Amino acid sequence: MSFNKLTVKMQEAIQVALEIASDFNHAELNGAHTLLALLRQDGGLAQPLFEKVGVHSDALQQSVKDYLERQPKIQNPVSNPQMGRELNDLLREADKQRTSLSDEFISVEHFLLALVKVRTPVQDLLTNAGVSEKALREALKDV
């Protein structure tokens, strides 16, 4: 997946997600790191979108952080985390969403839709928080 296919906000989120993964001493970058980065983004779409769905972004951030705390850590990190298969799958699904919506670049909304469609631990976190694909699509129309 080429970074050139991502919007600036999505590129920024991936960069911050790398920092988050590194802070947690994780070897792989995954969807949870990226979701946390999107939730922290100033002026980003994730917070208002989840608020529209009825999910408080602070509570969602905390559940994502709790999930990340429970993940295996590497003891002596020697390099940056690598993109994991999960994130690769999410970006592929986001690209499908981009195509179906006839957009030129993969944006935050495409990635958020991928998070609720692709079977990952993040999908479970979102489902438990009350986020469904239908609710997300409705919120996207309004935001």
Image: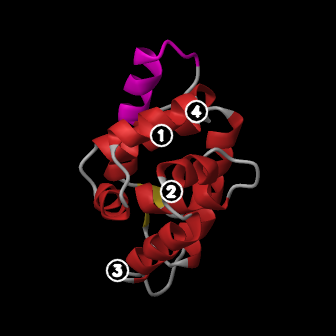
Real-space Cα distance between discs 3 and 1? Answer: 25 Å
The residue tagged with tag 4: helix, strand or loop? helix
* In the depicted structure, whether residue 40 falls above or below residue 87: below
Q: Earlier in the sequence, mark 2 or mark 1?
A: 2
Q: Residue extending furthest top?
A: 102
* In the depicted structure, whether residue 4 falls above or below residue 59: above
> Toward the viewer: 105 or 79?
105
**In front: label 3 or label 4:** 4
Amino acid tagged 1 = Phe
Amino acid tagged 4 = Asp
Q: Dot 3 surroundings within 10 Å: few (below 14), some, or many (20 or more)?
A: few
User: CB atoms at circles 4 and 1 under 8 Å apart?
Assistant: no
In percent of width and height, residue 106 lies at: 54, 29
Q: Mark on residue 72?
A: 3
User: Was residue 103 drawn as part of the magenta stretch in this picture?
Assistant: yes
Amino acid tagged 3 = Pro
Q: Residue extending furthest bottom?
A: 75
Q: Dot 1 surroundings within 10 Å: few (below 14), some, or many (20 or more)?
A: many
The residue tagged with tag 3: helix, strand or loop? loop
Magenta stretch, residue numbers: 92-104
